[in-house]
Image (cartoon, grey):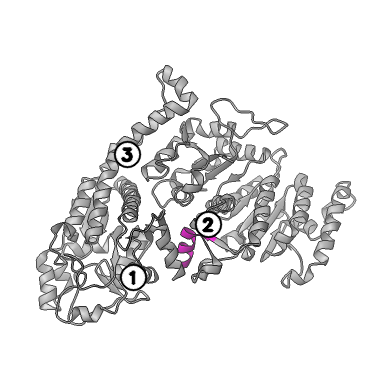
Amino acid sequence: MSLNIALLASPTLRCGPLSPLQRFARDFERFLEGHNVYTTEGCFRALLRAGVFLNHQSFFPTIPGYRGGIVRIAGGVLRDERGNPLVPESAPRMDVVVYLIDPRDPASNFPETNALKRECVVNSIPFLATSRSAREWAALTWEGASEFFLTESNSHGRAAFRAFEENVVALIAHDTKKQNMLKFVRTHFDVLLNLKGRIGTGTTATLLNGRQPEKYRNRPEWEKLRPDCEALAELIKNSKEKLRGNAEFVTVCKSGPEGGDVQIANYILERKCDVVIFFEDPHVAREHETDIQLLERTGRVRGRDVICIHDERTARDFAEKWRTRAKKPEALLVATALERAFGVKAVLVESGKSHGPHDTYTWDSILRGAAWVLFSEIVTRARERRSRGEKLRVTTSWGVGMSELISKVKEVPRRLAELEMEVLERLRRTLRENEREAKRGRVLEVEVVDKELMEARNVVAGPMQGVMAAEAEEVEANVISRALADCFLGESVAVPVASVLRASVGGQADRRERVAGIGEHWQRTDVLITGCAPVREESGRQVHAPQLRGYYHQVKDSAGDFGGIYLHTRGQECRAAGFERVGMSVEEVKSVKGRGGSFLVVGREESRLEIARAALLGDLVSVLITDLEFGRRLLLR
């Protein structure tokens, strides 16, 4: 069944291909293409500029959030007493709202943002405000997509897997929702029992332990709660052996008004709480509203975000899917498994049918995907740097693959211009509100091309290593970096031929003298783009190992070449005696991760698996761009 999904994000979480919004949309692009996706104009533009949803015919923008876009989405959440939509024609019915919220963004506490979340809770519509919540929901909902997932049973990279049972869940409920929480826990007791731990605020946790809280002594509300509480006490009594030595089913924190929400927020910061199930009642005044807001905002902190569930219906849906998943081998999205196993973000294009060792179809798909990602990354970071009056330094490796990649990057602005016309035409055909507005001369304008964005001008590109003695000039790193600079109307720096000759002939010349000019560029590189290759003396017209006396024999047993650096299988550099390479050092490559990103673009050939894995193990890569099958094989190796 096709769903209507609102896909939104704070500005800081949507810009650039590594932002949470774009990573979610890219990783689950095939899943989302099976549904109708609605978003605000800013998110729509950011996704298209990064090459996401280019072919999705049911991807629609509304007006910018600050001009009422969030209000439109909220209108699509409203339901009447029978659950039927109460939506104006301009607000399509919403089934799920994914709104990745940055707690640092002032708009995260604007009335329209709070109202959207409130209406989702009132109408039992999933409101997924953290990256982890959105990814968990999508992974649980996506059916028939085994090629995008890896199961623990057939993976050697088991470090990537962390069973759901290892999570700790926080269980919280307002007074009017405590009976709902009791019934939920009774129904899904088996799922919650198998978790590593359960914590809760005072009164709720006491009830979930099967006891009468002091708060309900001599109060009529207790008679309504007693049956479920006593039934839960019996379940706990019969499950003592499975409680993993815990004295109680739920660890009791302070009550909410006394600081319990703050306690749980600290558990989140300490990575001791992974899921928050909070049954909220938006219809009552809350005496400790600031504590509740603190808990919510803590759950959205990047790097600490948790699965947050706000209503009973969504909680039941998650719990039923967790129960079903527990009966199957643990499965993980391939991109997620790569991140957990190697600490690398992955951009995986769908694998084409193999056409032999040189699969040009898949390689072309990888290059196109990499071009969109790199273009978006460079222009996004260049804009940030330009606002501070700084340069963005980009370094590229050499080779045919790099030359082909830069050619694809050059095509992106032209494709964006074509895309803008295609999108506007599609919107005119498919959105009734646009048809009406067109008659009044007010067609929704979706600006995809931004001349200022495209012409970064403050980009400085340079080569990763010196001249590699290739016969074809276009594959030299100096030439490739100059071509990349031209894409953004930037400038380039080069490795002088003389410095390479002094290194190879003279042997031990002072490095600072040899890399004068280019050395500072290497030390300050923000974005590094490279490929990798196995060790070969010669391949076609390209030399893959310098043909210096004795050098090849010293590196031929290494895993291969990563941008001119030869690596052992575990990622350590393989150095050859009597030869000093002119290029970025391993230490300089690693330092790029702290400033920007080191991008490895690699095809699907079996011969490149070992060197790609060595680069990952050596902590030289922050973003891996390849095809889905190659990513899977890295984890199975």
Q: Position of residue 473 (x, y in %)?
A: 13, 58
Residue positioned 15% across, 63% down in the render: 495
Q: Nearer the viewer, residue 75 or 600?
A: 600
* Residue found at the very far front of the displayed protein: 355
Q: Earlier in the sequence, mark 2 or mark 1?
A: 2
* Label 3: which secondary element: helix
Q: Is residue 334 magenta?
A: yes
Which amino acid type corresponds to the residue marked 2 in the rendered image?
Ser
Query: How would you classify the magenta stretch by its main secondary structure?
Result: helix
Q: Which residue is mark 3?
A: 416
| Mark in the foreground, 2 or 1 | 2
Please report the bounds of the magenta region as a residue range.
332-342
Q: Position of residue 137 (x, y in %)?
A: 58, 50
Which amino acid type corresponds to the residue marked 3 in the rendered image?
Leu
Q: Which residue is mark 1?
A: 611
Q: Quadrant of the C terminus?
A: bottom left
Left or right, 152 with respect to 545, comes to right
Q: Residues within 10 Å of mark 1 (few under 14, many from 20)?
A: many
Q: Which residue is mark 2?
A: 146
Residue 17 drawn above or below residue 433: below
Residue 629 drawn above or below residue 117: below
Q: Residues within 10 Å of mark 3 (few under 14, many from 20)?
A: many
Q: Position of residue 575 (x, y in %)?
A: 25, 79
Q: Nearer the viewer, residue 143 or 512?
A: 143
* Label 1: which secondary element: helix
